[in-house]
Image: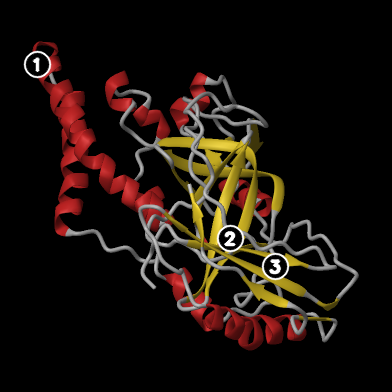
Amino acid sequence: MTAKRIGILAFMVTAIGIVVHWTQVPQPDPGANHARGVNDEAPVAPAVRHSHPDHTPAAIATHACAGCATHQGSVAPATREADDHRAGVVLTPAEASVLEDFTDTVEDYRQAPPAHAADATADLLAAAEDRRPVMARLIRDDAAQAFAHAMPPHEIAALPQAVQARMERHVTAIADLNVLCAFHPDTGGEHRYTVVLGEHEYGANVMAQRRPHGPQRDVPIYALVLDRLVAVHEQAGRPLAASEVAARGLEPDAHHALIGETVHSFDSVAGMEQELAAQADTDTVGITAHPEGGSQRLLFIRVDFAEDTGDPTSASNLLDLTSDVLDPYYRENSYGTVDFSGDVRVTDTLRMP
């Protein structure tokens, strides 16, 4: 089924406490969001839970991913394919030209004599507007390339305020990093990631080495933010440039990195990189144990919307999903202690507001 604003709100009423759900999170108004150690030059604008507009899930499971488990080291083929669709985004010639033109325009702005400053600023503003959708696509679809093409924060700070407002922002913060699993009975599974900053949750594109196997609480992250899009770097913090070191009055011969809201100093680049990697260790995860098992009950609640009507999938597909995917998956991964041979019900399609 093609991507629609149609979903299945499915609840597993289980003794092990697994809840599978899909929701559309209301869009909070943009505003300041500096809870729990957010460090950047501007507030992070709130974002919707799901960052990729072309992938509407039928169901999302927090940590317990039906049909696409990475927790035990096994990845279902459908999940692997879905995850890999974001890797290796190829810039079109037009997009590459936009990025190159922006770089050239920045250099022209820096070298412009005072008499031509206004024209150089106008050209730079136009180039930043052209660059913005290209960076947005990279942040959404390819975190590694987004960071590769991002302008360093100390260089952004030297641009006119109007241009800075159109640029990506480098954010270091203490946040929650969550992994979700979208599973559609027709198209298979796909991992999704969210970042919780303060009271807001953002759909996030996470570099492969940083993708957690389960929820991480109060961990340092280094992210790029543009509008409602977030890309998370594989390292937990950001090395400081020489100009930032000088501005902060830090030891010039040492190496410094911003992790959360704290500057850490190191004797060597290797030591700094080792610490940034250690702070981003994806194995540092708090997993809640579920000691009870047994046969689980499952309720699928099918929904549609006024502007996009129709059954999201058939009741028979969902029953097949339960017997052919969910039941064997949980039997295998729980060593026979959990199964879905219990009561399985599918509602009629309900109209959402």
The quadrant of the rendering that contains the N terminus is bottom left
Q: Residue at x 48, y 40 (%)?
A: 47
Mark 2 element type: loop
At numbered mark 3, what does the secondary structure look like: helix, strand or loop? loop
Figure check: 137 above or below 242: below
Q: 224 or 193, which lies in front?
A: 193
| Left or right of 171, for residue 106 | left
Residue positioned 69% across, 55% down in the render: 215
Q: Nearer the viewer, mark 1 or mark 2?
A: 2
Q: Mark 3: give few (<14), some (14-19) or many (20+) Cα within 10 Å.
A: some
Which numbered mark, 3 or 1, is in the foreground of this view? 3
Q: Are marks 3 and 1 in contact (CB under 8 Å)?
A: no
Tag 3: amino acid:
Ala
Q: Is residue 197 left or right of residue 327?
A: left
**Front-most of residues 147 and 4:** 4
Q: Residue at x 39, y 69 (%)?
A: 85
Which residue is tagged 1?
A: 116
- Whole-angstrom CA distance, mark 3 to mark 2, is 15 Å
Task: Give yes or no for contact between labels 1 and 2 (Cβ–Cβ under 8 Å).
Answer: no
Residue 64 bears which disc, if any?
3
Under mark 1, the amino acid is His
Instruction: Residue 160: tell me if it is visible.
Output: no
Which residue is under mark 2?
211
How many numbered discs? 3
**First-in-chain label (1 vs 2):** 1
Residue under the image location 70 percent in, 67 percent down: 64
- Residue 56 appears in which quarter of the rendering? bottom left
Instruction: Compute the Cα span from label 3 to label 1.
Output: 59 Å
Residue type (three-letter) at the residue carrying disc 2: Arg
Tag 1's secondary structure? helix
- Estimate how packed mark 2 is, as few (under 14), some (14 to 19) or many (20 or more) residues with alpha carbons within 10 Å: many
